[in-house]
Image (cartoon, helix red, strand yellow):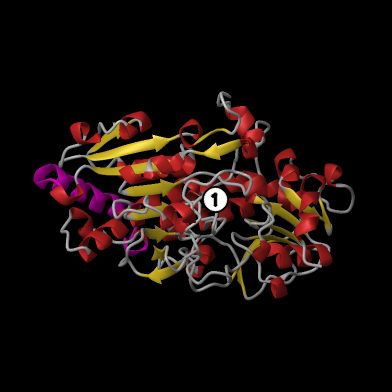
Amino acid sequence: MNRIGIREEDMYAWERRVPIVPSDAAALRDEGIDLVVQRSSKRAFSEEEYRRAGVPVVENLRGCDRILGLKELPVDAIASDTLYVLFSHTIKGQAHNMPMLARLIERGCTLIDYERIVDDAGRRLIFFGNYAGLAGMIDALWALGRRLSEEGIDSPFAALRRALDYPDLKAAKTAMREVGTAIVSNGLPEAISPLLIGIAGYGNVSRGAQEILGLLPVRQLSPEALLAGEAPALVDRHTVGAVVFREEHTVEPRADGAAFHLEQFFADPRDYRSTFERYLPHLDVLMNCIYWTPDAPRLVTKSWARGVGASRRLRVIGDISCDVEGAVEITLKATEPDDPVYVYDAARDCAIPGVAGDGPVVLAVEILPSELPREASTFFSEILTRFVPSIASASLEGELESSGLSRELQRATIVYRGALSPPYRHLEGHLPT
């Protein structure tokens, strides 16, 4: 049985999650899997918790030819002939991670990406998405409170803290319920009523965001009602309006008179153009929870921000998906949990730290689930644990198909023994020369 190491997360100062929590690590060792944990002082689970679970804590992972992590690897930390399992953020050809991918190939490594572990229908099996939505909505409403205070508007949202500032999710939810009680009892200021929050997407990330928003007194609106101007009659000062947008609300076929077909949109989004900016003048907060590719239309463009649409009404954009200059083109950079927001200045096309300015506040934390590290790690670890025996026992001597990796893991193998797997050979054109 091959030794598996859980690596220290050294790319992000605020990354406190773990792929396998102590209790699951102990259960795997009881099954005969040789698993160790690299030392780290910043994990949400302490070294002592792993030791109490009977899991060795080691200084380095020499001797481990299978390594589990979460985020990208520093190029100089990549060991030869090693199997790595992590979120590589390479499948879109992300330029900043191509040197890492090139080094993995050069050193004869194997790379399995959690994002590509899917079932036969293409549904993701391992994810943190729900926790990104939970933390993202907490932070977005915190940012709204700060922005309103900057404008001299008192609101119940001023009492909120960032997700990372609460001891756990339960405490954050308690604080959100208290905000909801204040809205019911005292109402929102006339200056921000009706308060309307839009959520683009309906998957795991969106469900997390909606779970937090649902702790407030919410009135659900349709996109059609939003455009028809029905919100003032439906959402009073003691409620918050919520609108969930699906693909058919955000795009339309480029061909005149053509009907929207979801399968066609997924197959080639270039055949569609965005219609989303028509909603923006009606929203106070936008949460971006969609999966975006460079071929897909954008939700928010820089040209909109420069034009008449960039009004003061849209105060906060919670870009949970966090593709830099992606679905939200004014997401100019990703942020860290301790400094999560900036204002987009359309005139200068730049990010201004804080919440003051003429443009919307952009929340773009790339590692949002790390703000709820224990709960997110426990959820993730429970799913990942069932794949670990296959990772530990696989033989990487022959072809991928005969390696012993499960079918799901084979599909998620981006690099195998130093070569891009067939489904990912398109990444060759993105590698540094």
Number of callouts: 1
Residue 150 in the image: above or below residue 227: below
Tell me where residue 278 appears, x and y as whole percent: 40, 40
Q: Residues within 10 Å of mark 1 (few under 14, many from 20)?
A: many
Tell me where residue 354 appears, x and y as whole percent: 34, 69
Say which quadrant the C terminus sits in: bottom right
Horizontally, residue 57 falls left or right of residue 391, namely left
Q: Residue at x 72, y 46 (%)?
A: 390
Residue type at mark 1 is: Ser
- Most foreground residue, 344 or 12: 344
Taken as a whole, is the magenta stretch helix, strand or loop?
A: helix
| Extreme-left residue of the structure | 186
- Most foreground residue, 354 or 249: 249
Does 431 lie within the magenta span? no
Q: Residue at x 50, y 34 (%)?
A: 247
* Element at label 1: helix
Question: Does residue 341 appear in this view?
Answer: no
Horizontally, residue 338 falls left or right of residue 326, namely left
Q: Quadrant of residue 118?
A: top right
Residue 376 in the image: above or below residue 345: above
Does 183 lie within the magenta span? yes
Say which quadrant the N terminus sits in: bottom right
Residue 408 in the image: above or below residue 97: above
Residues shaded magenta:
164-188
Q: Residue at x 47, y 38 (%)?
A: 275
The residue carrying mark 1 is 381
Horizontally, residue 240 falls left or right of residue 30, namely left
Tell me where residue 374 appears, x and y as whole percent: 44, 57
Q: Residue at x 39, y 36 (%)?
A: 244
| Extreme-right residue of the structure | 398
